[in-house]
Structures are given as structure tokens and as C-alpha cells.
Amino acid sequence: MGKVAFLPFSVGGGLLAGVIAKKTFALIWSLIDDQEPPQPEHRDAQLGKLIAAVALEGAVFSLTRGLVDHGSRRAFARLTGAWPGDEHPDER
């Protein structure tokens, strides 16, 4: 039941994380280069800049999503008293 009730938190958190990550990446990239970050579909993209842009964008999005997801789970647990997920990582 807790996982179903958490679904709106998860969707909202995902949307929020996307907005925050996009703005954060744009801010960080503006400190690296004056031009817009290269995209894979750009014909004349320099390979080094493209690699840096794609790697940085992936790292920023992953970090932001993880932090927002964990924060939304903590907020859900404070509101409901139930943690929506596993309490501890699986042991191998």
C-alpha cells in the first residue's frame, strides 16, 4: 500500500529533479564554456567537448534524481510513518 501511495510523490519528484538538473547543468556548463553544450546531432561538434558535455549532463541528472528521490521518500515517511522502499541495501 505504501508504494502505491508514494507514486504521486515519485512522479512529482521526478519532474522536479528534471527541472533542477537541467538548470544546474546549464549553470555548470556556462562556467566551462561560453557556447551552448554540443549535442550528438550537431555535425561539427568537437568530440572532446561532446564527451565532456554528455558525461557531465549524465552525472548531474543522476545525482539530482537520486537526491530528490531520497528526499521525497524521507518526506513521505515523515508524513505517513512508512518508508516507501527497502530499509537497507541487499547483502551479497
Image: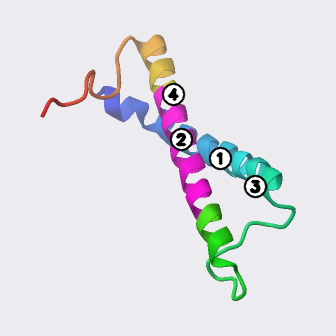
Disc 3 target residue: 29
Residue 71 position, x and y percent, is: 52, 25
- Stretch of the chain drawn in magenta: 54-70
Say whether residue 48 is left or right of residue 63. Answer: right
Task: Please state, as top left, top right, bottom left or bottom right, where the C terminus lies in the image.
Answer: top left
Q: What residue type is labelled 2?
A: Leu
Disc 4 target residue: 72
Disc 1 target residue: 21
Q: What residue type is labelled 4?
A: Ser
Q: Quadrant of residue 47?
A: bottom right
Residue 76 position, x and y percent, is: 46, 21
Q: Residues within 10 Å of mark 4 (few under 14, many from 20)?
A: some
Q: For marks 3 and 4, give the CA distance.
A: 27 Å
Q: Which amino acid does label 1 sit on?
A: Ala
Disc 2 target residue: 63
Q: For marks 2 and 3, give the CA distance.
A: 16 Å
Looking at the rendered structure, the secondary structure element under dot 4 is: helix
Dots 2 and 4: beta carbons under 8 Å?
Answer: no
In this rendering, which labeled residue sits more in front, label 3 or label 4?
3
